Image: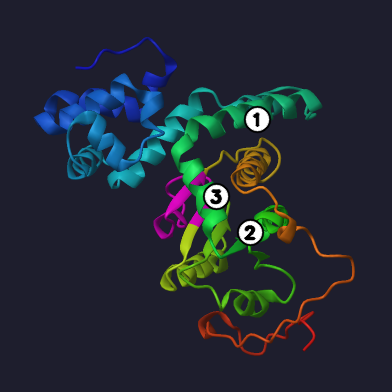
Amino acid sequence: MAPITNSKVYDSDLMLKLRTRHEKLGPALQKVSGFLLANPYRSATLNIEELAVVTGTSTAAVNRMANAIGLNGFTGLRFALMENLLAVVSAADTIHERLQHSSDKSFYLNHQISLSKHHLDNVARMNDNQTFEDMARQLVRSQNVFVVGLGNSFHIAQMAAAGLNPFCVGAHCVTLDGGMEGSAYRLSNITSDDALLAIALPAYTRETIDMARFAQSRGACVMSITDCPASPLVKLSNKSLFIPTAHPVLPHSKVGLMAAVEALLAQVQLLKPMSRENQPPPAGWKPDRPSVRPSWPSLLRPGTPRKHDDPQ
């Protein structure tokens, strides 16, 4: 059995399952479970290939070990690892408990500051620098970058597209006025030279998933910013960044999401400083924009009027 540190992290359901089943597993699976027990924090940041390498096993062994303790393969395992980590230091849960059991039901500025610090720390814990760097470089080298965000991610998607615009050949927020038909028209010309940055928090909108799937079918590089590996965006993405979203009062906290987007924008600017030819155009300048024929009929809803179409 791997050494057990006296820490609250080992009292979680996941760690108790690992401790109980460790000795009953085969040699290869014991290597995986032993590493998870010895490295509960680091394990949450590794993908399946990295976990196989550090344990000297294989991706198949990692999946078998996850199934052996009742999880749905590596996706379920990594989600449980991150929940295990966040549960130990969850500021959102602490504040929620205080609001539930205290006579003072107010949410103060210091509560938000504490929560924000916690989420920012966990953005670093939940992601690795290599994935972040790969995503920034992909944004720089793509011919066009299409940004998708609906519902509670809509305004962040707009911010991301606006921030990328001076440093990319073309940066477009797909999800603007005009409903899904307008979004389909904007995305219909995506190619294998382009990238899609999809942003989605629970509950994930079906349209965001459909647009990511469409971009993938066109050979574009799909990247996502979402809450955890169990997000439906992850299996459609080449790279993903994960951000904590818990808030004791609001449906979601967007502090981590804002930080991830702002960090990507900063790195893109360092990788590709704005050249003279990429300077913003003069006020009042309007490019010629030919109308784009839709090639994504499955998402166009018959009978839905298009609002604010571009002038022909």
Magenta range is: 223-241
Q: Is residue 12 visible?
A: no
Residue drawn at 45 percent across, 69 percent down: 192
Quarter in which the N terminus is drawn: top left
Q: Which residue is mark 2?
A: 168
Q: Residue 290: where, in percent of width, then height?
A: 69, 86
Residue drawn at 66 percent across, 54 percent down: 167
The tally of labels here is 3
Q: Which residue is mark 1?
A: 96
**Three-letter residue code for mark 3:** Ile
Q: Quadrant of residue 266?
A: top right
Q: In the shown orientation, is residue 151 left or right of residue 188? A: right
**Three-letter residue code for mark 1:** His
Q: Earlier in the sequence, mark 1 or mark 3?
A: 1
Q: In the shown orientation, is residue 56 left or right of residue 157? A: left
Callout in the foreground (1, 3): 3
Label 3 crowd bin: few (<14), some (14–19), many (20+), radius 10 Å: many
Q: In the shown orientation, is residue 72 left or right of residue 251? A: left
Q: Residue 22: where, in percent of width, then height?
A: 19, 25
Q: Nearer the viewer, residue 209 or 87?
A: 209
Label 2 crowd bin: few (<14), some (14–19), many (20+), radius 10 Å: many
Q: Quadrant of residue 117?
A: top right
Q: Which residue is mark 3?
A: 225
